[in-house]
Amino acid sequence: RVPYRVEKVNMRCYGAKPDWFQALSPSGNLPVASIDGKVLSESNAILAALEETFTAGYKPMLPTDDDARAARVPALLKLERALFNHWMRWLVARSAFEDEMMAEMCEL
């Protein structure tokens, strides 16, 4: 089990972030996790830290290096980031990025 506490914080497009959050994550990016005193603000870094810190004795979340599927992980994580970034751009400025997003999504 992973000990956690949830603190709800607005996404940038829904309003200002509280001062305590800006002090924790000056970029204001979400998500943020504090794991063993280290603040992480990238989804993939958080996933890797959770994997490293809390999976002893449990089935790992990602394929291990000796698993043939492990080679696919970087490309899939890159795809996830691309999709998320496009979704966020669409969410906050639909008209400005709609044509660009559709063209890039077709390439994916």
Image (cartoon, grey):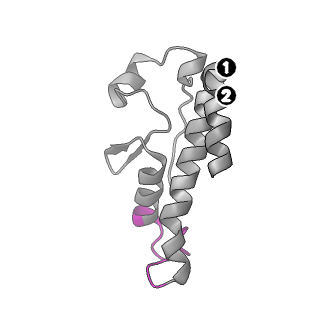
The residue tagged 2 is 98
* Magenta-drawn stretch contains 59: yes
What residue lies at 40% left-to-right and 57% top-to-bottom? 49
Mark 2 and 1 residues: CB-CB less than 8 Å, in contact?
A: yes
* Up/down of 18 relative to 98, above or below: above
For label 1, the crowd category at 10 Å Cα-Cα, with few meaning under 14, some 14 to 19 and many 20 or more, is: few
* Up/down of 34 relative to 7, above or below: below
In the drawing, does residue 22 fall left or right of residue 6? left
Q: Amino acid at mark 2?
A: Glu
SS class, disc 2: helix
* Up/down of 46 relative to 41, above or below: below
In the drawing, does residue 4 fall left or right of residue 37? right
Front one among 18 and 72: 72
Residues under labels 2 and 1: Cα distance? 5 Å
What segment is highlighted magenta in the picture? Answer: 52-66
Q: Amino acid at mark 1?
A: Ser
Q: Quadrant of residue 22?
A: top left
Q: Quadrant of residue 20?
A: top left
Front one among 4 and 8: 8
Front one among 78 and 101: 101
SS class, disc 1: helix
What residue lies at 45% left-to-right and 73% top-to-bottom? 56
What residue lies at 37% left-to-right and 30% top-to-bottom? 25
In the drawing, does residue 48 fall left or right of residue 91? left
Residue 51 location, x and y as percent?
46, 64
The residue tagged 1 is 95
* Magenta-drawn stretch contains 62: yes
